[in-house]
């Protein structure tokens, strides 16, 4: 059997030197710094390590990652490895405060969404109960005109009820 040639070069090791092309250097930085932060996060989670990484892009923009926080890790490093209980408590309190803020924002968004849904349903019920001000009946409404999902479901249900009532009336009258 003759040896077949590989169609691709495969994965190759790149030489570790400064990339000459500035655009290629920036692209490489943007891809590799995210990978480095992901690996640092995995190390912190899997091993319980405290990790801090500070990098500056070729443009001079800083990128920081730290677990539990960059400040806590840097303060511990500067103090010679001594755990400062006060700074750890401050970091924990700040994290709890952030979580509580996000929870409140979430609850506010959910309540606004529920209010909007309720208003849309009520508007649909009002339109279904009476004709529009321009003399059109509710079944002539344009369904593409901003109806929400719940309002559309209510509209479809009302149409089905109307069709059943019409069919019942037509079926009960004697034919001429």
Image (cartoon, rainbow, N blue to C red):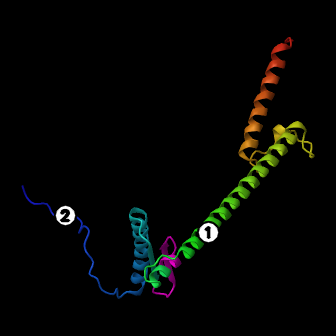
**Seen in the image, is 158 located left or right of residue 18?**
right
Which segment did they paint magenta? 56-73
| Residue located farthest toward the left when viewing the structure as drawn | 1
The N terminus lies in which quarter of the figure?
A: bottom left
Q: Where does label 1 land, which residue?
A: 93
Whether pointer 1 and pointer 2 mark residues with C-beta atoms closer than 8 Å, the reply is: no
Q: Spatial distance from mark 1 to mark 2, Cα to Cα? A: 57 Å
Q: Quadrant of residue 168?
A: top right
**Seen in the image, is 82 located left or right of residue 93?**
left
**Seen in the image, is 29 located left or right of residue 8?**
right
Which percent across, then down, holds residue 153? 73, 38
Which percent across, then down, holds residue 174? 86, 11
Front tag of 1 and 2? 1
Q: Residue at x 47, y 83 (%)?
A: 79
Q: Residue at x 22, y 64 (%)?
A: 7
How crowded is the residue under tag 2: few (<14 C-alpha within 10 Å), some, or many (20+)?
few
**Seen in the image, is 133 located left or right of residue 11?**
right
Q: Is residue 83 magenta?
A: no
Q: Residue at x 63, y 67 (%)?
A: 98
Seen from the viewer's position, the closer of residues 165 and 47 is 47
User: With respect to residue 103, does 164 lie above or below?
Assistant: above
Q: Quadrant of residue 55?
A: bottom left
Element type where label 2 sits in the image: loop
Q: Where does label 2 land, which residue?
A: 6
Element type where label 1 sits in the image: helix
Seen from the viewer's position, the closer of residues 70 and 163 is 70
User: With respect to residue 120, does 72 lie above or below?
Assistant: below
Q: Is residue 69 magenta?
A: yes
Instruction: Indicate which disc, 1 or 2, sits on the residue closer to the N terminus.
Output: 2
Q: Is residue 145 visible?
A: no
Which percent across, then down, holds residue 97? 65, 67
Which percent across, then down, holds residue 155? 77, 38
């Amino acid at each position: 059997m003759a040896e077949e040639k590989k169609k691709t070069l495969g994965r190759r090791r790149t030489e570790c030197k400064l990339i000459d092309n500035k655009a290629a250097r920036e692209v490489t930085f943007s891809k590799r710094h995210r990978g480095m932060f992901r690996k640092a996060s995995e190390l912190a989670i899997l091993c319980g390590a405290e990790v801090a990484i500070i990098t500056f892009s070729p443009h001079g923009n800083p990128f920081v990652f730290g677990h539990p926080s960059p400040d806590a890790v840097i303060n511990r490093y500067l103090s010679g490895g001594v755990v400062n209980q006060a700074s750890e408590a401050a970091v924990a309190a700040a994290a709890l405060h952030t979580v509580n803020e996000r929870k409140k924002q979430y609850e506010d968004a959910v309540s606004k969404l529920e209010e909007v849904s309720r208003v849309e349903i009520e508007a649909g019920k009002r339109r279904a109960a009476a004709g529009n001000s321009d003399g059109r009946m509710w079944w002539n409404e344009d369904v593409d005109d901003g109806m929400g999902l719940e309002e559309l479901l209510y509209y479809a249900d009302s149409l089905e009820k109307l069709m059943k009532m019409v069919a019942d009336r037509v079926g009960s009258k004697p034919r001429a």
